[in-house]
Amino acid sequence: MKKKRGCVGFFLGIMLILLVSGAYALERVEMWSYVPEGNYLYTAIDLFNKSQNKVKVVAKHIPFGELKRQVTVAIVGKNTPDFMMIDNPDHASFTVMGAYADITDRIAKWEYSGEDFFPGPWRSTMWEGRVYGIPIETNTLALFYNVDMFRGAALDPNKPPTTWEELTSYAAKLTKPGVYGLSVCAVATEEGTFQWLPFLWQNGVDIDELDNPKAVEALELWVNWIKKGYVSKEIVSMDQWSGVRVQFVNKGAAMMVNGPWCLPAMGDVNFKVALLPGRVAKASAMGGVNFAFFKGKNIDAVWEFMKWVYQPENLETLAYKWGCLPVLKKVAETSPYWRDPVGQVFVEQMKYARPRGPHPRWPQISDAVYTALQEALLGAKTSEQALKDAAKKIEPLIK
Amino acid sequence: MKINIKFITKGERVGYLYILPAFIYIVLVMIYPLAFNLILSFQEVNMMTLMKPTKALIGLENYKRVITSFIFPISLKNSFIFTIGCIFFQFTIGFAFALLFSLSFPMASHLRGSLLITLMVPQVVVSILFKWLLSGDYGLINELLIKLHFIKEGLAWLADPKTALAGVMLANIWIGIPFNMMILASGLTAIPPDIYEAAAVDGAGPLRRFIYLTLPLLRPSILIVLTLGFIYTFRIFGLIYAMTGGGPIDSTTVLPILAYKLSFLFFEFGQGAAATNILLIVLFIIIAVYLILIAKEEPRE
């Protein structure tokens, strides 16, 4: 009797060991991002995990405003995750801090190279000629407009504004009691900088020349809109998603500057999309996030996930359900999801989308820009003075 | 006076052992961070140098950068306006309440107790509460002011750089009144009522009694409540940050918010440390003033 019990126990023990070791053969990698729960990204991660049993990706959500702080704390405390998604203008700061792994050699052996990606997003991952991440999601700003309101103001919906003068005059014609001709975001955060910079760039100058008269023109454009009432006075506190988009969808504005993340939530508005106006040049701002990998972590395991994500079908579905553009040029140009007129405008606009930075001190530069924006819009300073002060703040940062 | 260690009795030695845990705690939780912060303010620590094993010592460079920045004079001015304005109203209103509750009337103690609620509500909750009260479109405060004919149409309190500081001051005054009331009330109860009777007999009216009896006798309480109030108010961060984030256009950026921005938005840790030390210096000066004023009290030997 004792012998039999001993045998059974022995076999159970072996089975337990085998089961447990099976679980340990699975490599677990952790990712941090600010992507809100409910986004298709988490479904995609599930699909990857179920499709093989070597690597398990565990994703942790951290709110946007907190992400950089928590990552900094983790870096100092040496308990970072394996990889993360980082907003593209912030990529350079962490690279310079020494947190991210140099993956230039991995990319060299990969099926894709920098050329396969849109140039703006790819540039944001680079520092001093080496690669420190891979773009995953990209987006840009374009001009949305309400077709019915255009007709109501005797404007041709097939001829959207293409210059600053046209944009302003259209906004004037479309403004009536209860409806603003245009809506933009001018909040005192990165979003405000993100929305105004395209106009600075369209006039042929950049943040290193904020005291240039052309920069003053770009700011006066916005100040004029608010003075004449073509935009709401509240734009200084309206963010892009719950402010500008909501105003447009509720038919409180006839046009808005916004991004493709709005497309899944446009209500019943009959709208079209056009390129942002050009002046000296066509330009828009580039948004989006990049994957970045922490030094000394299990990047080989993470790379299995990368190989899966960047397969054209997977990337296409992820981008579409996320509400952003696929970062691989080939996928973006051939994807049926982006063949419609709206999609084509965004794909075209991506060609003129410029990244912010990359500069390790971008948060301070951005602070100077949106502070100047608010000072001029709220009438606290003239545009010249506001930009002069901003230029003085930025000068030591970009030396 | 020579201190002779040989004469520390066994009892005293045991006594020192008893306070040792508390002493270690204070060193770890208070002295070490203070020292670390002080050293940090003399080092070049930002995004780029954070992970380097040794950080360069740059002397007073961080202090220079903070003091010569655009935002420093604004934040210093805001800090003083905010602190002095809040203290003034908290003190006078708290004093009025203390005087009111020194009279006994039915439900006095219940009412006085209910005022303490403002101290118990978490700062962030007060922020959210006052954000609603001060709302330009549907705020109660605008309603009230319009009905009382003080203004014709609602002000966008927290969105207008001219009124935002007043808005956050209103919230803080509301919080601080009972603290002032409590300390002044306890000071009032310590004054023997016979003095008032004697003064009344001598023909002093209520105002003269107040100015020449109450105020001088309350001097220690008044000094402590003003000093503690100043120190506490000067350091306030959460309330203002939750209400306005320091805006609009830095009109509500006080020194603590500046320090936070430097460290956690710009990742300039050295400068953030310098900003907090400047705050510390201001508070040291205030405490020194308090100690001088209170020393005048001591009877001369």
Image (cartoon, coloured by chain):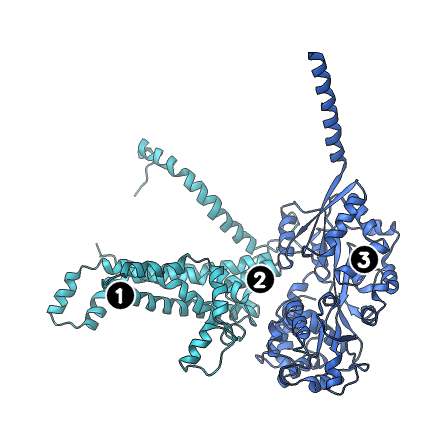
Chain colours: A blue, B cyan
Circle 2 crowding by C-alpha within 10 Å: few under 14, some 14–19, many from 20? some
Numbered mark located on residue B261 in the image: 2
Name the residue: 74% across, 77% down. Answer: A145
Q: CA distance from mark 2 to mark 3?
A: 39 Å
Is there one chain holding both mark 1 and mark 2? yes
- Asked which quadrant contains residue A95, the reply is bottom right
- Quadrant into which the C terminus of chain B falls: bottom left
Label 1, secondary structure: give it.
helix
- Chain letter for mark 1, please: B
Q: How far across and down, in percent of the image, does residue B67 sit?
A: 54, 66
Three-letter residue code for mark 3: Thr
Task: Give residue A317's mark.
Answer: 3
The correct choice, above or below, for A255 with respect to B23 in the image is below
**Residue A151 screen position, x and y as percent:** 76, 84
- Quarter holding the N terminus of chain B is top left
To the question of a shared chain for discs 3 and 1, the answer is: no
Q: Secondary structure at mark 3?
A: helix
Numbered badge on residue A291:
none
Q: Residues within 10 Å of mark 3 (few under 14, many from 20)?
A: some
Image x and y of residue A119, in percent: 83, 64
Residue type (three-letter) at the residue carrying disc 1: Leu
Please tell me whether mark 2 sits on a helix, a strand or a loop: helix
